[in-house]
Amino acid sequence: MKTVAGVFAAETQAVRALEDLHSADIDPHSVSVIARSREEAREVAGGLIGALTGWGFSERQAHEYQDRIEHGELLLAVDVPDDRDTGRVEDILRRDGGDMVSTGSPRR
C-alpha cells in the first residue's frame, strides 16, 4: 500500500478533491482528512509525525505537512493499493489545488 498526500489551503479545494476522488472510483474509506484542532494541535503533533513517517514520508516532509496543518490547511491522504497507479490520485489532488503532493514510500 502506498499513500498519496497533499495539503489544501481552502476547504473548498479539499472538498472538490474528495468529490473527484469519489468520481474516479477511489474507495472513500481509503481517504483520510487531517485538519487542525485548536485545542489539540500541540498534543496530536507527535502522533501526526509518526503517522506520516509510517506512511513512508520523510521526517522533513512530515514536519512540513504538520506545519501547514498547524497554520489551518487541510491534509488529504489517500491509500492506494500496490497494484494501482498513484499518478491518477496525484493528478486529482494537484488539479484541485493540492500543494506538496507526493507519494510516500513505506519501508518494508
Image (cartoon, rainbow, N blue to C red):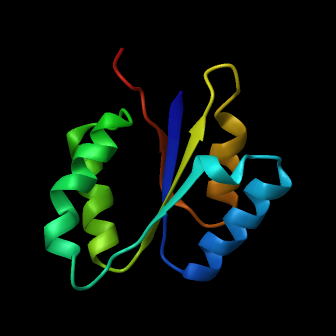
- Residue lying furthest front in this view? 29
Q: Residue at x 27, y 61 (%)?
A: 66
Quadrant placement of the C terminus: top left
Q: Which quadrant of the figure has residue 10?
A: bottom right
Displayed quadrant of residue 52: top left
Left or right of residue 90: residue 20: right
Give the answer, above or below, for where 80 lies relative to 50.
above
Q: From the top left corner, tell me how far across and down residue 25 is, in percent.
A: 82, 47
Q: Is residue 66 left or right of residue 22?
A: left
Up the image or down, 50 lies above or below 2; here it is below
Hey, which quadrant is residue 40 in on the image?
A: bottom left
Q: Is 25 or 100 nearer to us in this picture?
A: 25
The residue at 27%/55% (across/down) is 48
Residue in front for this viewpoint, 7 or 36: 36
* Residue at image location 36% in from the left, 32% down from the top: 56
Left or right: 9 in relation to 65? right
Total marks drawn?
0
Whole-percent x, y for residue 22 in the image: 78, 56
Whole-percent x and y of residue 93?
A: 63, 56
81 to the left or right of 73: right
Q: Residue at x 49, y 49 (%)?
A: 5
For this orientation, the residue located farthest to the bottom is: 38
User: Along the line of sight, which residue is nearer the eye, 77 or 94?
Assistant: 77
